[in-house]
Image: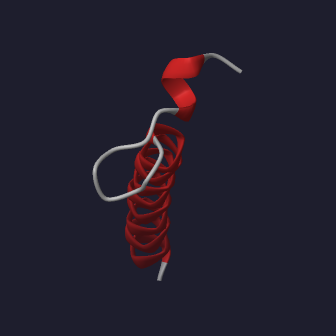
């Protein structure tokens, strides 16, 4: 691994941790969007 991804900020968290956190946040937003679309689609057919 490169040194950059393992560097640690003043509070002791690695950059990799924040990259993973951002990824999870993006995944959650996508999931919520899909859930909303499915809900609206279901509402149309009822």
Front residue of this view, candidates 42 and 14 = 14
Count of numbered badges drawn on the protein: 0
Q: Residue furthest top?
A: 2
Q: Quadrant of residue 40?
A: bottom left
- Identified at 71% across, 21% down, the residue is 1
User: Measured from the top left, where is residue 39 in percent x and y?
Assistant: 44, 74
User: Measured from the top left, where is residue 21 in percent x and y?
Assistant: 46, 54
Q: Residue furthest right?
A: 1
Instruction: Establish if 30 lies above or below 39.
Output: above
Q: Quadrant of residue 29?
A: bottom left
Left or right of residue 17: residue 43: left
Instruction: Establish if 15 lies above or below 1.
Output: below
- Identified at 28% across, 50% down, the residue is 10
Front residue of this view, candidates 34 and 21 = 21
Q: Residue furthest left?
A: 10
Instruction: Establish if 34 lies above or below 14.
Output: below
Front residue of this view, candidates 40 and 32 = 32
């Amino acid at each position: 691994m490169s040194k950059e991804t393992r560097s640690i900020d003043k509070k002791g968290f690695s950059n990799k941790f924040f990259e993973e956190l951002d990824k999870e946040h993006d995944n959650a937003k996508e999931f919520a969007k899909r859930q909303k679309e499915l809900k609206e689609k279901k509402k149309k057919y009822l």
